[in-house]
Image: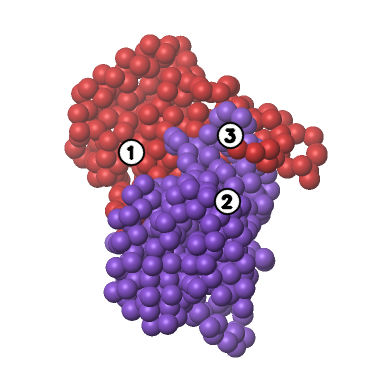
Chain colours: A purple, B red
């Protein structure tokens, strides 16, 4: 079974959290909450335990990992071996990598997720840490090398760079800055209450917002001076709301009912096909841009 | 002579304003400031008259146009006929179109600018009004039909949609929303202290920031629901700092020393070739993205 990752851009509404509970097995789910990113893990854990329980999860428990010895302890790995779903909360993504990176917990999670035994969920910092290259900060307006700071993530989803709270915090500059420096990484900007659900080589967008994909691999020229603005020509940008898909290997968006040029029968529905997410946002009626005038 | 437009994304530093004075003729310049967009035209006029005079313009005067009769008066057109440069200040772009649109002033300006007798400058609202379709507002995060409101501009530069204060106010969402609705219009997001200088079919970027070009004409699919998020696949995005150019008709960026595939001799320098703008930002050293690690 392929790895299943539910990567949420922060501020998840009930529809996305219900989806996580369902993926983990609903009434049979055994969910483990890891609030390592949080400055106040106790209250964060309590919030998610209550929430997932209220949404029908069979069992929910927190696994407190604040030190590397804890992340290497047999008690921790035993808890994970029993889980069907593991959820990383928000906070500071660098706490997750600093505490878990390279530990027994990290190794076991990679194995359980890759084998499909565990569905891995994460929001905000818990989303950022899933990529190979993680955005850890950035300052100032403009597209510059200084506009983004990056570090290695835990690589549950290799080949991508994830940014969260994307539309809400106006983070295109830092995502463009990041992919201009690392055009081999695909840039994913995930809005709040929005997620990607991976299914092997493909992901689908869920939730009320959109995922902005920036593919600088397509760029015809990139200049990254050590100071001053970056130049980037010919990058591709896709804005994908709920129901739309993206193929990671081919770097191809699949939008709505697929291209009008291609009227082959639709491919069979994939097992994790999205149910209607919160706030609507299913495939929109066809018709291209509305030129009928102003709103 | 081709129309010369200096379109500034707001908060212009001295280098851009000096450039405008030079284009208008420096010591021989006769500059007219139009502060129609401003809520406080008197102080705005005084500021620009003092600034342009201090930067060496031969003569500078304000033309107060707050009503349509004023914009149709022979006194106004007489002032414009004597000008070598006309500068529109910031404020509310809808005041410019409401007061000037279709008046004798508008018609004469179109003629003088198209004939090359006058260089036309504008910042912020004075930049927005130069496009055929003008962004007049927009609310909320995300890429949606509601995220942007547009109206007709004065069309000094047809075929484009201009947004200002672009990086500083995180306005990608509204520019993407606009071009998804009107993919025949090229989206230009101009940073503060940054400008485009048109020269016929081409523009060059000046200043300390960058111009973000979104070309939704390249999109393979666009869905604009009346409510909820827009889907947009396959749009092109270019981030062009000072010294880089863009060809409007072919929708082609010219970046740095031009593409590595094409080692033909460089074209002859164009007359309005940029001098070194404020804050550096000339063509960056070649070399592609730096994969050497984090900053």
Rendered residue at 47%/41% (across/down): A137
Q: Residue reaching furthest front?
A: A74
Toward which corner of the image does residue B253 lie, by quadrant? top right
Q: Is residue B262 left or right of residue A130?
A: right
Taking A200 as reference, is B259 above or below it? above
Is residue A114 visible to the viewer in this orientation of the structure? yes
Closer to the N terminus: mark 3 or mark 1? 1
Q: CA distance from mark 2 to mark 3?
A: 21 Å
The chain to which mark 3 is attached is: B
Residue at 68% across, 48% down: A220
Check the image and report above or below for B1 versus B132: above
Residue A121 appears at what percent x and percent y? 47, 65
Q: Residues within 10 Å of mark 2 (few under 14, many from 20)?
A: some
Q: Residue under circle 1? A: B125
- Same subunit under labels 2 and 3? no
Looking at the image, can residue B74 be seen?
no
Which of labels 2 and 3 is toward the front?
Answer: 2
Residue drawn where x is 32% and y is 21% of the image: B48
| Residue at 38% over, 29% down | B11
Res. B295 mark: 3
**Residue B197 numbered mark, or none:** none
Density class for disc 1 (Cα within 10 Å; few <14, some 14-19, many ≥20) is many
Discs 3, 1: same chain = yes
Between B216 and A104, the one nearer to me in the picture: A104
What whole-number distance in Å separates the C-alpha atoms at marks 3 and 1?
36 Å
């Amino acid at each position: 079974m392929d790895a299943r990752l539910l990567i949420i851009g922060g501020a998840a509404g009930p529809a996305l959290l219900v989806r996580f509970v369902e993926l983990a097995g609903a009434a049979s789910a055994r969910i483990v909450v890891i609030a390592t990113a949080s400055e106040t893990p106790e209250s964060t854990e309590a919030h998610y335990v209550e929430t997932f329980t209220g949404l029908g999860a069979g069992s929910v428990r927190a696994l407190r990992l604040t030190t590397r010895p804890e992340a290497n302890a047999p008690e921790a790995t035993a808890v994970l071996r029993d889980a069907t779903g593991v959820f990383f909360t928000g906070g500071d993504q660098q706490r997750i990598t600093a505490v878990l990176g390279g530990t027994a917990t990290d190794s076991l999670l990679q194995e359980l997720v890759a084998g499909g035994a565990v569905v891995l969920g994460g929001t905000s910092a818990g989303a950022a840490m899933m990529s190979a290259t993680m955005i850890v900060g950035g300052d100032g307006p403009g597209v510059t090398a200084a506009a983004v700071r990056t570090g290695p993530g835990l690589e549950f989803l290799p080949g991508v760079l994830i940014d969260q709270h994307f539309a809400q915090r106006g983070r295109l500059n830092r995502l463009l800055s990041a992919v201009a420096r690392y055009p081999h990484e695909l840039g994913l900007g995930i809005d709040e209450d929005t997620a990607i659900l991976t299914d092997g080589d493909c992901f689908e967008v869920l939730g009320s917002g959109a995922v902005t994909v920036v593919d600088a691999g397509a760029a015809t020229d990139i200049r990254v001076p050590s100071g001053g603005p970056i130049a980037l020509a010919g990058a591709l940008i896709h804005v994908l709301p709920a129901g739309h898909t993206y193929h990671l290997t081919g770097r191809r968006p699949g939008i709505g009912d697929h291209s009008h040029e291609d009227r082959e029968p639709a491919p069979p529905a994939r097992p994790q096909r999205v149910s209607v997410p919160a706030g609507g946002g299913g495939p929109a009626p066809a018709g291209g841009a509305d030129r009928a005038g102003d709103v």
